[in-house]
Image (tube, rainbow, N blue to C red):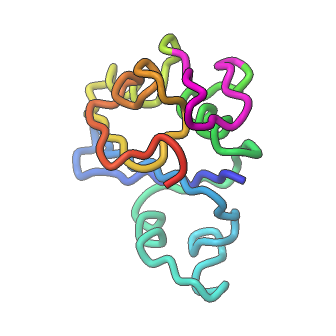
Amino acid sequence: ACTALPTITLAQDAQKPNILFIVSDDTGYGDTGPYLGGDARGMPTPNIDKLADEGMMFTHFYAQPSCTPGRAAMQTGRIPNRSGMTTVAFQGQGGGLPAAEWTLASVLKTGGYDTYFTGKWHLGEDDYALPNAQGYDVMKYAGLYHL
């Protein structure tokens, strides 16, 4: 299962907040401190706890049963059927998130944000589907599939 733990951290500049969006695979709703896990489950999450204390938390959300559809939904804000990303993408299949899709990064860029992607992408391997073609200014230490 693919679970998102989004956290938004507000900057000192009240006009435009900094946004940190964290996506984690195989993390349950109650696994981290802000959601009654962490210390209570024997695995402290002090950095995530601090982000939640200083930012925003979300308590009502939907998840997809696997990585690719879940990540497509988070990036586009649409159900995976709309982008055609309904099954797990595997290395060598080609394709990926359609170039015509608006992503979180491409929308943030219209608001003057600089965007950075690191970690597991899992939304395709063709040039048009890579993070730097989907609105991210910088892509470093990114894996297209499992890390």
- Which residue lies at the image location 69% right of the left edge and 63% below the top edge? 29
* Observer-nearest of 34 and 14: 34
From the viewer's perspective, tell me whether residue 41 is left or right of residue 8.
right
Residue 120 belongs to magenta span: no
Q: Position of residue 99 (x, y in %)?
A: 48, 14
Between 12 and 67, the one lying in front of the other is 67
Q: Where residue 7 sits: x, y (%)?
A: 48, 54
Q: Position of residue 129 (x, y in %)?
A: 47, 23
Q: Magenta stretch containing residue 95, yes or no?
A: yes
- In the displayed structure, would residue 63 be above or below residue 132? below
Total number of numbered discs in the rendering? 0
- Viewer-proximal residue among 101 and 91: 91
State the residue at coordinates (23%, 45%).
13
Q: Note whether 137 is above or below 6 in the view shown.
A: above
Is residue 92 rendered to the left or right of residue 105? right
Q: Position of residue 48 (x, y in %)?
A: 46, 68
Against 41, is 51 above or below? above
Q: Is residue 134 left or right of residue 72?
A: left
Residue that protrudes farthest toward the front in the picture: 92
> In the image, what residue occupies the spot 42% across and 50% down?
119
Outermost residue toward the left in this view: 13
Residue at the spot 56% in from the left edge and 37% down from the top edge = 91
Above or below: residue 9 compared with residue 132: below
Q: Quadrant of residue 140?
A: top left
Principal secondary structure, stretch drawn in magenta: loop
**To which quarter of the image does residue 85 belong?**
top right
Which region of the structure is painted magenta? 82-98
